[in-house]
């Protein structure tokens, strides 16, 4: 397929008709119709089923469109970068973060890196762990920031930026709020807010509760821990969350309780193993570890100095706890 054929195919898929595609491309309807038929003959598959003036894409057409859309996203990135060069932007950094780290950690790191690199162009997207992994593998983002990682993808570099505790959150009048610590058995309740077994967060909760061998059927399922905390603060349910999200949501309507058997997790900045991070990307990883340490130990924040711009150590070369200490010099 050449670029013109790809353009026409995409226009037909978007418009749903030959006439609509012809209007969008400013060409005649017969020209579009001929090209579509030629493309089907060349590929040896039917791309559309025709009903009057409407075209109904076949499964093969939908599969082809996914690849075409991916190609167009790549072209859009090239155009965007060319536009940045035209305006004198020296570098660009694309970040995808889950909500837990995107609420405060990523914004803090961005504020500091922009102070030292004012011409750096940064884009940020909140996404799930699966979406972040896909974007890193496809080259759609440079750094992915995540809290819970059960499985490490072999094509990604994992830069530990800090460690945290798994906590339980609930309203002050919830029956479990009277306990100082909660066991896995206590959490075997129908009002336990679920994250879905296919998510990283859901797998962590499943592993925590798996020892009791008492299956439960949660009636509320969410994607983001922030939403789960909001539901709990509104007066319904208990949720197992990371301490970063829990402390961000903590207030008069939400209390936190530790687990009787403490559970730790590691947060990571992920990057593609095939595409080395730029100097701005490496600095961002260091700043993420630096600000994680400050947020994890607010009492010691005043004793710490901002991370020097010349710091060259990366979190990927140290254990999570050492990474946090290195990134936050005393």
Image (tube, rainbow, N blue to C red):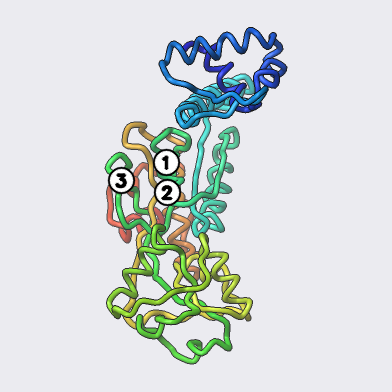
Residue 71 horizontal/vertical position (percent): 49, 24
Q: Earlier in the sequence, mark 3 or mark 2?
A: 2
Q: Nearer the viewer, residue 46 or 296?
A: 46
Q: Nearer the viewer, residue 330 or 126?
A: 126
Q: Nearer the viewer, residue 74 or 123?
A: 74
Structural distance between the alpha carbons of marks 3 and 1: 11 Å
Task: Name the image quarter holding residue 150.
Answer: bottom left
Structural distance between the alpha carbons of marks 3 and 2: 11 Å
The reply to whether residue 141 is visible in this rendering is: yes
Q: Is residue 103 left or right of residue 210?
A: right
Residue 36 horizontal/vertical position (percent): 55, 14
73 up-or-down from 102: above or below: above
Q: Which residue is mark 3?
A: 153
Give SS at disc 2.
helix
Q: Which residue is mark 1?
A: 134
Residue at 34% in and 46% down: 314
Q: Which mark is residue 130?
A: 2
37 up-or-down from 206: above or below: above
Q: Are marks 2 and 1 in contact (CB under 8 Å)?
A: yes
Give SS at disc 1.
helix
Location of the C terminus by quadrant is: bottom left
């Amino acid at each position: 397929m050449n670029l013109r054929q790809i353009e026409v195919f995409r226009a037909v898929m978007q418009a749903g008709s030959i006439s609509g595609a012809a209007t969008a491309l400013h060409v005649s309807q017969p020209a579009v119709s001929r090209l579509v038929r030629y493309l089907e003959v060349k590929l040896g598959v039917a791309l559309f089923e025709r009903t009057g003036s409407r075209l109904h894409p076949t499964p093969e057409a939908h599969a082809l469109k996914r690849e075409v859309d991916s190609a167009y996203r790549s072209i859009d990135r090239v155009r965007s970068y060319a536009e940045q060069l035209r305006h004198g932007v020296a570098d660009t950094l694309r970040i995808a973060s889950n909500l837990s780290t995107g609420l405060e950690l990523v914004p803090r790191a961005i504020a500091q890196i922009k102070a030292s690199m004012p011409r750096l162009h940064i884009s940020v997207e909140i996404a799930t762990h699966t979406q972040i992994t896909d974007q890193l593998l496809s080259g759609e983002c440079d750094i992915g920031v995540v809290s819970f990682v059960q499985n490490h993808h072999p094509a990604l570099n994992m830069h530990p930026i800090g460690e945290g505790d798994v906590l339980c959150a609930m309203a002050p009048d919830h029956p479990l709020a009277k306990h100082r610590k909660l066991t896995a058995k206590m959490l075997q309740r129908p009002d336990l807010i679920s994250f879905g077994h296919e998510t990283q967060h859901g797998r962590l909760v499943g592993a925590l509760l798996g020892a009791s061998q008492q299956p439960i059927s949660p009636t509320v399922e969410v994607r983001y821990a922030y939403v789960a905390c909001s539901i709990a603060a509104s007066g319904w349910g208990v949720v197992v969350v990371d301490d970063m999200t829990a402390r961000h949501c903590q207030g008069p309507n939400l209390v936190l309780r530790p687990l009787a058997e403490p559970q730790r997790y590691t947060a990571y900045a992920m990057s593609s193993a095939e595409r080395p991070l730029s100097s701005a990307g490496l600095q961002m990883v260091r700043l993420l570890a630096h600000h994680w340490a400050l947020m994890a130990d607010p009492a010691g924040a005043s004793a710490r100095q901002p991370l020097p711009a010349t710091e060259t150590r990366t979190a990927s070369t140290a254990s999570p706890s050492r990474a946090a200490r290195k990134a936050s010099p005393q």
